[in-house]
Image: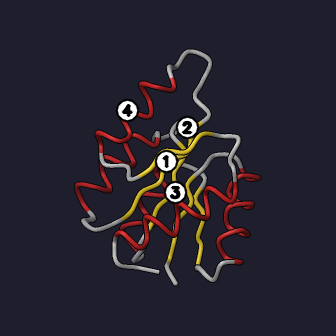
Amino acid sequence: MARILVIDDHEQIRTIIQLLLTGDGHTVDIAEDGRIGLKMAREFDYQLVITDIMMPNQDGLEVVSKLKRTIPGIGIIVITGGGPRVDITDLTETARLLGADSVLMKALDFELLRAVTAEVLTAYGYR
């Protein structure tokens, strides 16, 4: 099973994803913003990062960009609900251009999240 990092500023979302993926046998760590998440990603060996886009301190797009530049071979799933003045289409396109393997919309379909997690991990040779 894989070691996964979940980065989201909403505690409930972090906790739900952690419980869901831990139940699938993965080791799941959590971070409340991009700055903390990037620090953790440099310290630990993660196979997958699941990150929100709209967060304080360091947004998810910057997280994706930095992870892809500094940690080759890491899978990235972006989750987003957009924002009041943000075009979700632009966010998802930018996330993909920066290297995100998949983009999922909030409110999350948890079965879809599980399936995409397995798909991305398999693509990187993990499971």
Q: Pick whichever of labels 2 and 1 is earlier in the sequence.
A: 2
Which residue is depicted at the point 45% across and 41% down?
Answer: 58
Residues at discs 1 and 4 in contact (Cβ within 8 Å) = no
Residue 126's quadrant in the figure? bottom left
Circle 1: residue type? Val
Q: Name the residue under label 4.
A: 93
Circle 2: residue type? Pro
Left or right: 125 as drawn, with respect to 3: left
* Spatial separation of the CA atoms under disc 1 and disc 4: 11 Å
* Spatial separation of the CA atoms under disc 1 and disc 3: 6 Å
From the viewer's perspective, is the residue at label 2 or at label 1 nearer? 1
Residue 13 location in percent, x, y? 71, 52
Q: Name the residue under label 1.
A: 78
From the viewer's perspective, is the residue at label 3 or at label 4 nearer? 4
**Colour scheme in the image?**
secondary structure
Q: Pick whichever of labels 1 and 3 is earlier in the sequence.
A: 3
From the viewer's perspective, is the residue at label 2 or at label 4 nearer? 4
Left or right: 113 as drawn, with respect to 109: left
* Spatial separation of the CA atoms under disc 2 and disc 3: 16 Å
Residues at discs 1 and 3 in contact (Cβ within 8 Å) = yes
* Badge number at residue 56: 2
Circle 3: residue type? Ile
Task: State the count of labels.
Answer: 4
* Spatial separation of the CA atoms under disc 2 and disc 1: 16 Å
